[in-house]
Amino acid sequence: MIALALTCIVLLLCLAVAGAFAALSPSGRHIVYGGALAISAASLLVALFSLGAAPSVVTLPLGLPWTGAHFRLDPLAAFFLVVVGLGSAGSSLYALGHGRYEHEPQRVLPFYPVFLAGLNLVVVADDAFSFLFAWELMSLASWALVMSHHRETGNAHAGYVYIIMASFSGLALLLCFGLLAGPTGGYSFDAMRAAHPTPGIAALALVLALIGAGSKAGIVPLHAWLPLAHPAAPSHVSALMSGVMTKVAVYGFVRIAFDLLGPPAWWSGTMVLAVGGVTAVLGVLYALMEHDLKRLLAYHTVENIGIIFIGLGLALAFGANQLPVAAALGLTAALFHVFNHSVFKSLLFFGTGAVLTATGERDMDHLGGLIHRMPKTAFAFLVGCVAISALPPLNGFVSEWLTFQAILLHPDLPQWGLKLAIPADGALLALSAALAAACFVKAFGVTFLGRPRTRAAADAREVDSFSLAAMFGFAALCLLAGILPGAVIDLLAPVTQMLTGASMPTQLDVAWLSIVPVESARSSYNGLLVFLFIALSASLAALVVRRFAAHGQRRAPAWDCGFPDPRPETQYTGASFAQPIRRVFGAVVFRTRETVTMPPPGDIAPARIEKHISDPIWDTLYAPVAGAVWHLSLLLNHLQFLTIRRYLGFVFAALVILLLVLALWQ
Amino acid sequence: MIQGLFVQGAQMALVLLLAPLLTGLVRKVKARLQRRRGPSPIQPYLDLKRLLGKEVVLAENASWLFRVAPYVIFAVTWVAAALVPTFATGLLFSWSGDLIAITALLGSARFVQALAAMDIGTSFGGIGASREVMIASLAEPAMLMIVLSVALVAGSTQLSTVADYMAFSAVGLRVSLALGLVAFIIVALAENARIPVDNPATHLELTMVHEAMVLEYSGRHLALIELAASLKLLLYVSVIACLFFPFGLAGGYALGLATWLVKLAVACVLLGVFEMSIAKMRVFRVPNFLGAALMLSLLGVLLLFVSGGM
Amino acid sequence: MTHGFAFDVAHMLAGGLVLVSFAMLYQDRLYALINVLALHALVLAASVAWQAHVQHAPHLYITAAIALGFKAIVIPMALRRMVFRLGIHREIETVVSIGLTMLAGIALVALSMMVMLPVTAHADPIAREDIALALSVVLIGLLMMVTRRNAVSQVAGFLSLENGVNLAATGAQGMPLVVEISVAFSVLIAFIVIGIFLFRIRERFDTVDLQVLDQFRGERG
């Protein structure tokens, strides 16, 4: 099985080379994306079959001579390979249609398969060296893709911030693996599993893993690169970065925290819960302030990563208290959300890409009324919005429901940190879910509904059938995962069995296809029945209304309380929609200020309303660090302009100091 | 099985039939307190009949979403109301959705309603939708926290199980339930667009939230939306009754039905008196009001985590 | 929990006091604040009376009567007259927004639970949680004093703090009456002194708003 997965990766690398040569020819797009689609589908099938099978290992004589390169396909890797394969297949299918509008295909086509190869390789790597090599490959390939439209304003800055944060995450992970390998230098994951580090070393390794993997996933405060880099890339790559690459980062954290480190410490759950809760709420608040569709979606990814980390924190907390079944529930909730988010976030990015190609606009304040011009895209985007707002009967609700069940499971834990963190996270999760619904009413309502605000929006046309196929495929998957959640939970059972030693009860045996996380007296949910009831009630209402109500219907101008205004500028923009929430939450979190300047009577100047939003994390964390590094480098710059005598003096001083140290050490 | 189906069907029909009467009773109580005669309590039924007989006037740029939304809102609210134990617990399909699912179903209805409000592209729709999601962003977390505190007390999130626990076991007086009750009343007032959060009888743009969202609807569509709003009020009153005042649920169907009707009547009178006693709040005082509900419910959950006896 | 009806009612009254403290944090108009202060004292009186009944300690009935007479009736009436004569009944005054203040209140409740429950692990279970709730009432009273600009509402915070101390003392089963009387009288004296000073300040500076008064201090620290 692992051999098949590795073959797919090698094929992807060959495809990259082919892409480099065929980039400028008209069929280059078909070769690269079609090939990527086929290989991703194959890898998806391999992963699905390996979910239930025993782990398979292979060691190749590449890389470091005394370690070699180890690769392993166990249930955890298989699940994440499913996520990666599904996301890559969808993106490739979408790109078959969308890639036609790419102006510089030679900057995108060679790097896309390399990116996919990097994503797959991280998941199957079984020793520190190949893991970090694949991690850096993934980062560099995606950086090249982010810089592919480098002439557009802001993209160069985005790429710069991205490469700095990616290197930072690689450095943190390097230190973490170094700590885990210990003085003996056992870099393979088997050696790390067998070693038992002291609690201090394990604590430091966990913090480094959270920083390293978390900054790639996008936890607050290490998230600042995400809303810059994800929108800068082409739309299918944005979908991959948000939907798949962040999940691969989550895989890195899960592998280290649950597999390599052994039994968790009692405080690790509190730390991850705190990080997850804050990330969830801050991410969605940032998203509400945005009016660029892609940046909104990127900030929303931050929120969903927060939700995933809440589930992981619960799993760590229960694991530290020797409650393996509860830990399995928490882990299942987190991994279910990993799957859900990769599906609906990719769908939403595909929709945004479709809108971008149809109108040339990403700013929702320049769009509007697209439901009439692009009805199929609008429908698929609506399904994505409903799914991401955690509304039944779609899949987003199921993972949120499972997380709440995990929160309720053990209120009597002994540690005070957990006693306070778990209810706080329940409140933060509920708050972020409600704010997410608000955010997507705004996104869909301002972009697709209403009247068109610009000529570009009024002239939009529906996109090609490949893009639509990808979008509808993912929309159908959202519905299926919401109606048949038991199937996904049973697929996750081998993963939780491997990591926590227990799994949830088999769901597909339950009557009527409900899901029962703990026992049926406690709680159950049936997505299929809820969906059927809603459909039946709506049909019944429609039938009764058709039978008993008047049938007349006529079109007329909008009522608007008697003062209809035909100009589309009188509609609500994104900023006006978010104003109440901005006023309630933004004043505290973002120090938002609105200033209104009214001209005196008789003056013909217009009145102005200005809103000022500051990003507290950028101002308090990134700007000072960047400033300090800049000052330090200015100081060190003096070293460039010394005389030869000074340089010789440095060498002499270094030699003398080393000899002194050698003398004193003995 | 057949008896279970019959009881479930009876429950669904009963909530549908009684919902407009509830709205009518509240209006009658308010009118009486204002020293007016007021319309008769069956006026909402006559209103629905009138609306069903009128033709629908659609705005020129209304999309399919605008036409489908009333059916979806009505269906989702009806399904949520069917899951609530009103005169008996253990209804046939009550295990398919628990309290969290009921909250989320009401959230779906609100989501579709807000989208329909934005569909025509008027500023009234925008104002209604943006205020509604602001209120929801605080009311829904408060509701979920109340659900969590009740679930921690009763050991389950299934509404039937919780109602059975409250009715049969010796729950006693608990601080977290008292906090939850206060918070739930605040959330119920906000979600049903009642004073002090929203005025159900106004059409001034400074004061409307729910009315602004349904401004463009007419005819049979408006009838469905009004019925859904009445159903939502019935749902909230029934949930408060079965969670915090479960007297009579322990007996048979007849006793359960009689006590449920009495509780509904009492709730109508209390709601009418309350709405007449205070004024509507400014829109930006509503977040403080709902924030207080969120804090109280969070405090209830915290007390339950910290010490099981509270 | 099957501790019985007495336990439940005592808990309910202590929890009710915490609820009324939060209601006091929520108020931003002075007359409403004074009404809630009267309710606070009323709940305290009920709680002390219940403790008197449960512990069979008749001297606590006197404490309850003092709470009812002075703190629920006399002091709020005096505060109302003072507010009316000072002419500040229309001012709305908070330093931090109400939402943040209530969040801080919840954090204080969590803190007092975290401190009190482990410390009193070997005490009577009925008294443990009541003492933790009483400490939270004290802390919330202090929070009110810190987050208010108006001197009258700071007095209200101080009085609710004293109510919390009373609750803790009665729950601990054995506060002699002489302590209660001396505490009550010292509060009364402090209150009279504060009232006199407020009027003098008002005559002198035309305002009792502390931030405005700050500017008259001379040297700025």
Image: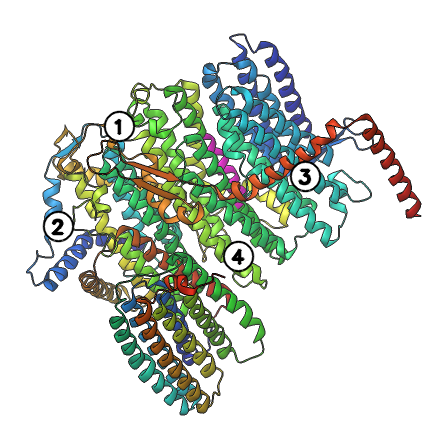
Amino acid under disc 4: Ala
How many marks do you count on the picture? Answer: 4
Residue A109, above or below A350: above
Question: Which is closer to the viewer, label 2 or label 4?
Answer: 4
Question: What residue do we see at 56% from left, 38% from top?
Answer: A217
Determine which of the numbered discs, if any, sits on residue A421 in the image. Answer: 4
Amino acid under disc 2: Tyr
Residue, disc 2:
B45
Q: Chain of mark 2?
A: B
Secondary structure found at label 3:
helix
Residue, disc 1:
A451
Amino acid under disc 3: Leu
Residue A470, above or below B243: above
Which of A151 and B29 lies nearest the eye of the viewer? Answer: A151
Q: CA distance from mark 1 to mark 2?
A: 36 Å
Q: Chain of mark 4?
A: A
Residue C24 inside the magenta-drawn segment: no
Secondary structure found at label 4:
helix
Question: Which is closer to the viewer, label 3 or label 2?
Answer: 3
Secondary structure found at label 2:
helix
CB under 8 Å between discs 2 and 4: no
Span colored in magenta = A334-347
Answer whether residue B108 is visible to the viewer in this image.
yes
Residue, disc 3:
A173
